[in-house]
Amino acid sequence: MDTAPVDRAATLALARGARRLLVKSGDGVLRLDAPLADADIVRHLVHEDGFLRVPVLVLDDVLVRGYTEELYRAALGR
């Protein structure tokens, strides 16, 4: 991300193709389904400096922010 920063517009473009956003939230998983509102995308993916600063897995039409075994199982449908 440091060599190719992803700004707000690019993050929105990436997320607009998703039908589901899974976010590690505390001890659980927050699940947002399409249509994803720009405000939700920005809230969960864009840092206050205007850039994507968290690892994001793109799996077909699912975006995953964060990592836990539970989160990846949810993303993979297992």
Image (cartoon, grey):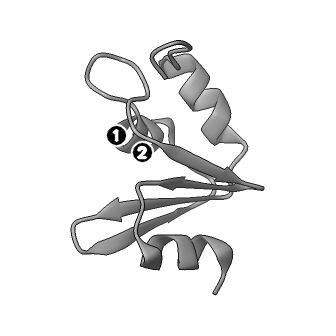
Q: Residue reaching furthest bottom? A: 78
Residue 7 in picture, x, y percent from top left: 49, 17
Residue 36 in picture, x, y percent from top left: 56, 49
Looking at the image, residue 9 sits to the left or right of residue 67; the answer is: right
Residue 72 or 18: which is nearer the viewer?
72
- The three-letter code of the residue at mark 2 reads Asp
Indicate which disc residue 65 carries: none
Give me the residue at 50% from left, 15% from top. 5
Indicate which disc residue 43 carries: 1
Residue 17 in picture, x, y percent from top left: 73, 43
**In the image, is residue 36 above or below residue 24?**
above
Looking at the image, residue 35 sits to the left or right of residue 21; the answer is: right
Residue hosting label 2: 40
Is the residue marked by circle 2 packed among few (<14), some (14-19), or many (20+) residues within 10 Å?
few
Q: Residue reaching furthest front? A: 3
Looking at the image, residue 38 sits to the left or right of residue 27; the answer is: right
Give SS at disc 1: helix
- The three-letter code of the residue at mark 1 reads Arg
Residue 59 or 38: which is nearer the viewer?
59
* For the residues bearing labels 1 and 2, Cβ distance under 8 angstroms: yes
Give me the residue at 25% from left, 23% from top. 48
Residue 27 in picture, x, y percent from top left: 24, 74
Give me the residue at 47% from left, 71% from top. 71
Question: Total number of numbered labels?
Answer: 2
Give SS at disc 2: helix
Q: Quarter-wise, where is residue 15 in the image? A: top right
Quadrant of the snapshot with the C terminus:
bottom right
Give me the residue at 29% from left, 16% from top. 49
